[in-house]
């Protein structure tokens, strides 16, 4: 009996409020807390965006920073319209936004320049659509490096322009892989 009293004294029972007030029991920062207070993020969830992926793949806090500042009207709607204009059906937008939150750090002007570059290299509208879908929109994250990356394949593998286009459409993630042109 005395041991039980000592244990109770050593480890007192707490009510829920007291437990939650202990620093070690307070939840760590997560995206769910932001979502509950952000109509923009709630609208993204309604589109089918899986914001838990943003948190899961956020090693440097960048995705959480994007979630904190995102505005549906200013950031999301224009990108939806831009992708529709490129022929990307709405059914793909949630996957693109889920897999590539960095798309919200790329300006619409830069995205448009990427499209114009592809057109100048004789990519068809269908090719461009397939590249955007196949790369989950990550192609936009590399707009300044794409010419070097495409040139690497053409030069090192002695490919024609048509063959490079075929690779870019069939395997856009290979083109934008960080090892190209360094590996």
Image (cartoon, rainbow, N blue to C red):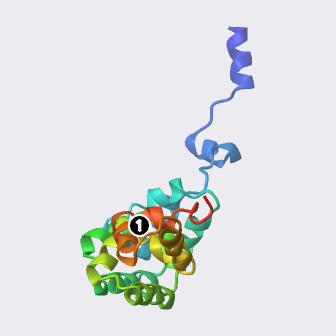
Side of 122 where 173 appears, left or right:
right
Residue at the (52%, 79%) spot, across then down: 147
Which residue is more in the foreground, 23 or 13?
Answer: 23
Across and down, in percent, residue 52 comes to 45, 56
Viewer-proximal residue among 14 and 165: 165
Instruction: State the image coordinates of residue 117 (x, y, percent, origin top left).
Output: 45, 87
The answer to whether residue 118 is seen in the rendering is: yes
Residue 38 in view in this figure: no
Task: Write down the residue under mark 1.
Answer: 172
In the rendered view, would you say 56 is above or below 94?
above
Residue 174 in picture, x, y percent from top left = 46, 62
Q: How many marks?
A: 1
Looking at the rendered image, the quarter that the N terminus falls into is: top right
Q: Alpha-carbon neighbours of circle 1 within 10 Å: few (<14), some, or many (≥20)?
A: many
Task: Tell which residue pokes out farthest to the top in this image.
Answer: 1
Residue at 60%, 67% (x, y): give it. 62
Give the camera-side residue of 124 and 69: 124
The residue shown at (38%, 68%) is 96
Q: Secondary structure at mark 1?
A: helix
Foreground pick, 111 / 153: 153
Q: Quadrant of residue 25?
A: top right
In the picture provided, is 141 more to the left or to the right than 169? right
Q: Quick one: quadrant of the C terminus?
A: bottom right
- Residue 13 sits in which quadrant? top right
78 in relation to 177, above or below: below
What residue is drawn where x is 38% and y is 66%? 167
């Amino acid at each position: 009996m005395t041991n039980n009293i000592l244990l109770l004294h050593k480890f007192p029972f707490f009510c829920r409020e007291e437990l939650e007030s202990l620093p070690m029991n307070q939840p760590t920062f997560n995206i769910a807390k932001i979502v509950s207070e952000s109509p923009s993020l709630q609208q993204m969830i309604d589109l089918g965006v899986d914001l838990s992926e943003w948190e899961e793949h956020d090693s440097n806090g960048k995705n959480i920073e994007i979630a904190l500042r995102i505005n549906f009207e200013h950031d999301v709607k224009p990108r939806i319209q831009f992708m529709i204009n490129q022929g990307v059906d709405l059914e793909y937008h949630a996957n693109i936004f889920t897999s590539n939150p960095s798309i919200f750090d790329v300006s619409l002007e830069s995205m448009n320049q990427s499209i114009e570059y592809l057109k100048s290299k004789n990519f068809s509208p269908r090719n461009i659509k397939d590249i955007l879908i196949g790369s989950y929109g990550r192609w936009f994250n590399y707009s300044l490096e794409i010419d070097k990356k495409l040139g690497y394949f053409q030069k090192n593998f002695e490919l024609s322009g048509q063959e490079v286009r075929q690779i870019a459409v069939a395997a856009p993630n290979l083109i934008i892989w960080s090892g190209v042109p360094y590996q």
